[in-house]
Amino acid sequence: VHDLRLLLVLAEVARRVEELLRDDRRPQARLRERYALPGLVRAAALEVLAHGGDVELDDLQPTSMIAVDGAVLVVGANGDVCRYDADDGQAGWSSCAQLEHDDVPATITQVSDSQVIICNPNEMVSIDYASGTPTWRIVSEEPLRQAITTNGTAAFMATADGTVAAIALDDGTTQWQSGPFDSVSAMAATDDAVFVTTAGGRMARLEAGAET
């Protein structure tokens, strides 16, 4: 008898979940509003939706994204940078952050519990992780290479002529600039050093704290 009751309950949950996913795009919020499911049944349905539902991104037209602990950050073709909850897909910010240059692809370079760093060939932007508010922005007259890296205290970016610059993460000020290299193809950083490779096959080591 108990097994039969359980099967009937699960069948009803499956029917309601299927109906909800067919009709709604924001599943967990709709489920709470429309169905007064009892404790364990409701939890089971939410778990199904969390792993099998989807989220309507409206006109965002995603071009890149990154998943971090508890959240998914998405960059749209219109220059929007949006945060969504990893469990239920709900918006994590009251409004998406906006890049000034929305006609070029952007890359999320770093995410911490306090800051998001995002770059495109024209700008580098720091966004507050909790609120989605931009805290500083650098717009470059020279195109930026996509070879950008961070070490927790600074972001390192390279311009088209191979100049490498260290940008303080806390306020966006330039700490130092190197002389030009050949075309920079990749960079990696530790607490003490920045390693730069060029399209010509050269690798150089720069001190992370000062120009060399």
Image (tube, grey):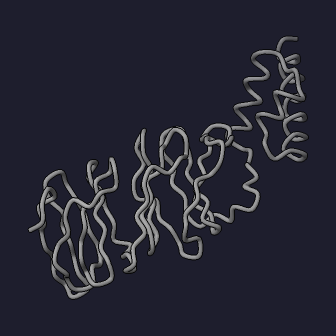
Question: Does 9 sit left or right of 185 as displayed?
Answer: right
What residue lies at 44% left-to-right and 68% top-to-bottom?
123
Question: Does 39 sit left or right of 208 as displayed?
Answer: right
Above or below for 73 versus 14: below
Front residue of 130 and 27: 130
Query: In x, y percent, where is residue 101?
Result: 55, 71
Query: In x, y percent, where is residue 211?
Result: 12, 66
Quadrant, the N terminus: top right
Q: Quadrant of residue 178?
A: bottom left
What residue lies at 68% left-to-right and 65% top-to-bottom?
61
Q: Quadrant of residue 121?
A: bottom left
Name the residue furthest top: 1
Front residue of 190 and 97: 97
Front residue of 102 and 5: 102
Above or below for 9 versus 61: above
Query: In x, y percent, where is residue 176?
Result: 19, 64
Question: Does 174 sit left or right of 123 as displayed?
Answer: left
Above or below for 125 versus 198: above
Q: Quadrant of residue 165?
A: bottom left
Above or below for 10 versus 136: above
What residue lies at 85% left-to-right and 20% top-to-bottom?
37
What residue lies at 27% left-to-right and 79% top-to-bottom?
184
Question: Does 18 sit left or right of 112 as displayed?
Answer: right
Front residue of 61 and 177: 177
Quadrant, the C terminus: bottom left
- How many tags in the picture? 0
Query: In x, y percent, where is residue 197?
Result: 21, 76
Name the residue furthest left: 212
